[in-house]
Amino acid sequence: MALTIHGLGTALPPHRIAQGEASALAAEVALPNQGRSPTQLRLLETLHRRSGVATRHSVLLEPGGPDGDSDAACHQTFFGPTSPGTGERMRRYAREAAPLALRAVQAALAQARLPPERITHLVTVSCTGFQAPGVDLALMAALPLAADVARTHVGFMGCHGALNGLRVAAGFIGADPQACVLLCAVELCSLHLQYGWDAQRIVANALFADGAAALVACGGERTVGGPGLPPLGRLIASGSLVVPASAEAMSWGIEDHGFAMDLSPRVPELIGEHLRPWLEAWLAGHGLDLAAIGSWAVHPGGPRILSAVTDALGLAPTLIEPSRSVLRDCGNMSSPTLLFILERLRRSGAPGPCLAMAFGPGLCVEVALLH
């Protein structure tokens, strides 16, 4: 029985910050007051301007204006002059992750027109926090879900985590045609803002943001969705590639002051060398070629990664615009980001089949073919 997506929901923290304001905050954590040079400040501003991000949302922001306007100047309430430890960051994750996830889940269930008691399996995805009891049990209590719902957590898989979760959901539905899976990805990347002057981590600070997304998937072709919304998608296949000799290209580790990402400038080069030959062979195994793909949901790890995918696959820039628009409006939210892109593609009536793609530590490529 094929997995069919019946509902998608997304959620963002209520407050956001413009990238110009984020550049000013970056100076506070990257450089000591007495040690800032005009050259370093210009470099920070340039990196933020070229990030492809216009605004980002964070659970750590408060509105600066009296009316709470999300476009008003914002300031950090969590990070001070010294970097907080991982324990403090995880306490904030425990407080903020579940409410944000719940909003996305409620939206997905409402769109699917399914009551919570219909859910048989719950798959949660996150790489920015750990707690037990965790987001899964919080969702079970808040919705509520039945006490015998089967729970699975996909942890620390990085930006392609939602695709790993989708593969898990497809396995459950394939084994039990009556299964109905609720998948929720929630990431609070801003908890892991890194202090100090380190080029790779400054780039990560300029890209990452907070968000949550959820989907409801069952077997069969049941017609669901709100009025005027096009049908969602059926999972045709999923695939995975570990790029050879790339283990140092992208990494994500737990350190004393949060979780830290190292992103090599070689990543676009590796994508350019390895992506097309593998993807063409994978699509051919399903009777398709690149020209047959009607729409693309490419995880926007950053503008250089999107450009590398576009160049490697010979795609028209318009095909990657949904990814660029999510990056521009929301930043890189890690695992929920792909579901934000799929939601935009669905609402625009984008043609199928759709190829969803994301990159993660390894360097690994994950894809899903939806139609």
Image (cartoon, rainbow, N blue to C red):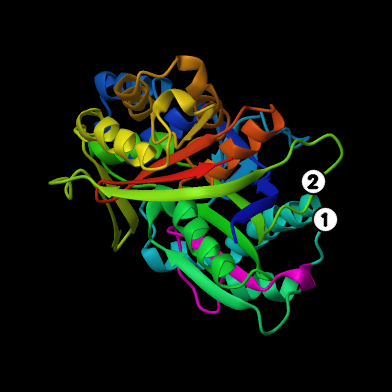
The magenta stretch is 116-134
Q: Is residue 281 left or right of residue 91?
A: left
Q: Is residue 273 left or right of residue 108?
A: left
Q: Residue at x 55, y 79 (%)?
A: 133
Q: Are marks 2 and 1 in contact (CB under 8 Å)?
A: yes
Which secondary structure lies at badge 2?
loop
Q: Residue furthest front?
A: 287
Mark 2 or mark 1, earlier in chain: 1
Q: Give the CA separation, mark 2 to mark 1.
A: 7 Å
Residue 39 is situated, as x and y percent measured from the top left of the image, at: 25, 19
Q: Residue at x 18, y 50 (%)?
A: 247
Q: Is residue 279 left or right of residue 362?
A: right
How packed mark 1 is, by other alpha carbons closer than 10 Å (few <14, some 14-19, many 20 or more), is some
Q: Is residue 207 above or below residue 94?
A: above
* Disc number for residue 113: 1
Residue 131 lies in the magenta stretch: yes
Q: Residue at x 46, y 16 (%)?
A: 317
* Disc number for residue 225: 2
